[in-house]
Image: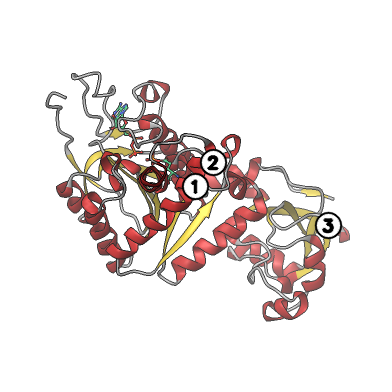
């Protein structure tokens, strides 16, 4: 490759919580199994972020690439069947987490997810609760797709898109994608020596998407296309994305000082707008939660979450994770729908904990999904959604 023009230096927008995605091209460079060569610099970056109180969720690839080397040694040849790939992932996954744990003096937790876990609202909530508990305890989650059980039709397939979904799931401020190239170029530099660096993308347009080509290495999946798809997903959730070269120790070390040599993909959506948009568009299931005047005021005026204490009853047969209407006292004894949100409990459970104190949830149900029946982040007031308040 001829010498490409360099990326200019720019400041990284402020962030406190980020998802860092590390591709196979970095942790298993050259197809020769795992190596600390580039992982070391990235681990130093993670450690310095952690030390300054920032939170990182690491999405690390490399399981298949690491397992392939071991299986090849045993079987003597490479087998590309799905079962073989899944066996490689199982083998390589322990090595991947092991490698990061060797390099980092931070407790790590392995989190393996499938497409189903992220599509199913209840499992999505469970994954979110686990990740937030880990971060609360200053443990770094190391996430990968659960390749061992995900069959072809149901896989997410690439960790760039997985990382974007996780960024929205944990409400990250930033998605950091470390790869084997300096950033986005106007065309794939492998076949276009005249490709120009793209320092900043104000908005992902079809013209930008068209710049992306396939993977550059034998171990990488998806190439620049899946990175731009990831940036688009993150952007829709109001999260900005950074692409940088994880092989360049200078670039990685400057990133610890919030200086970027790479591509910054901005978004026009704010996190709040994105969430409200989503809350407006997810259809509510039949049924509602009826609250008293005090709870209605707390939700409407104080930005509070909905606790069992202010709930009178639940109507309908909704499940944990469903979007439901929240109704309160209206004119002349009628009920008025004034908010909607994702319920952490089913209608049946709500009727067992209605009116009780949060500490009684566990006694009444035998378990607890937390003190909030509807968390503030999952709740939108009808007036914010620009819907008309309806008497029911
Ligand atoms: N427009 C582009 N700009 C930069 N890189 C591109 C572009 N189009 C395709 N690529 C390729 O994408 C590769 C990075 O993706 P990939 O190999 O999947 O890495 P990873 O393992 O980090 O996910 C680069 O090495 C590069 O060859
Ligand atoms: N889940 C797979 C990685 C899939 C993937 O997206 O790889 P990459 O493009 O290198 O980030 C693994 O751990 O091998």
Residue 58, horizontal then vertical, whole percent: 39, 55
* Location of residue 23 by image quarter: top left
Q: What residue appears at the point 67 percent right and 49 percent down from the top-left corner?
A: 382
Helix, strand or loop under label 3: strand
Mark 1 C-beta closer than 8 Å to ligand 2: no
Q: Residues within 10 Å of mark 3 (few under 14, many from 20)?
A: some
Q: Residue at x 36, y 36 (%)?
A: 220
Residue 7's quadrant in the figure? top left
Give coordinates of residue 92: x percent, y percent: 41, 51
Does residue 268 appear anywhere in the picture?
no
In the image, taking residue 222 as reference, residue 39 lies left or right, namely left
Kindly report the distance in space between the C-alpha atoms of the residues bearing marks 1 and 2. Answer: 6 Å
Q: Which residue is mark 2?
A: 83
Residue labelled with disc 3:
335
Mark 1 to mark 3: distance in Å? 56 Å
Q: Label 2 near label 1: C-beta < 8 Å?
A: yes
Task: Give the mark, 1 or 3, whose residue is nearer the N terminus.
Answer: 1
Dot 2, crowdedness within 10 Å: few (<14), some or many (≥20)?
few
Packing grade of label 1 (10 A; few <14, some 14-19, many >=20) is many
282 to 202, vertically: above or below: below
Q: Which residue is mark 1?
A: 87
Q: Identify which residue, 187 or 25, lies in the foreground.
A: 25
Q: Quadrant of residue 122?
A: bottom right
Mark 3 and mark 2 lie on one chain; the one further toward the N terminus is: 2
């Amino acid at each position: 490759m001829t010498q490409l023009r360099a990326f200019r230096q720019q400041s990284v927008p402020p962030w406190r919580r980020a998802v860092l995605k590390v591709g196979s091209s970095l942790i298993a460079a050259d197809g020769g199994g795992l190596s600390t060569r580039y992982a070391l610099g990235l681990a130093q970056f993670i450690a310095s972020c952690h030390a300054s109180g920032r939170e990182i969720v690491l999405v690390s690839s490399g399981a298949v690439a690491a397992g392939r080397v071991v299986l090849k040694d045993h079987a003597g040849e490479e087998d590309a069947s799905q079962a073989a790939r899944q066996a490689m992932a199982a083998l390589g996954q322990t090595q991947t987490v092991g490698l990061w744990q060797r390099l980092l003096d931070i407790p790590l937790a392995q989190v393996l997810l499938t497409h189903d876990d992220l599509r199913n609202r209840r499992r999505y909530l469970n994954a979110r609760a686990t990740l937030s508990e880990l971060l609360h305890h200053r443990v770094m989650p190391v996430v990968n797709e659960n390749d061992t059980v995900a069959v072809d039709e149901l896989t997410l397939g690439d960790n760039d898109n997985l990382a974007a979904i996780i960024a929205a799931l944990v409400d990250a401020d930033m998605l950091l994608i470390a790869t084997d190239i300096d950033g986005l170029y106007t065309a794939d530099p492998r076949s276009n020596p005249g490709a120009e660096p793209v320092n900043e993308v104000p908005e992902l347009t079809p013209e930008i998407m068209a710049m992306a080509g396939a993977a550059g290495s034998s171990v990488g999946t998806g190439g620049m296309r899946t990175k731009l798809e990831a940036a688009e997903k993150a952007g829709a959730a109001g999260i900005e994305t950074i692409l940088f070269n994880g092989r360049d120790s200078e670039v990685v070390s400057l990133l610890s000082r919030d200086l970027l040599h790479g591509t910054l993909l901005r978004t026009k959506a704010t996190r709040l707008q994105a969430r409200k948009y989503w809350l407006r568009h997810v259809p509510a299931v039949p049924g509602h939660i009826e609250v008293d005047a005090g709870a209605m005021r707390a939700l409407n005026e104080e930005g509070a979450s909905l606790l069992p204490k202010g709930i009178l009853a639940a109507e309908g047969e909704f499940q944990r994770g469903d979007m439901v209407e929240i109704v309160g006292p209206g004119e002349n004894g009628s009920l008025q729908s004034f908010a909607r949100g994702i319920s952490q409990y089913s209608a049946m459970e709500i009727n067992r904990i209605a009116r009780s104190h949060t500490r009684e949830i566990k006694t009444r149900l035998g378990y607890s999904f937390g003190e909030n029946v509807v968390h503030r982040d999952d709740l939108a007031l009808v007036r914010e959604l620009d819907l008309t308040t309806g008497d029911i």
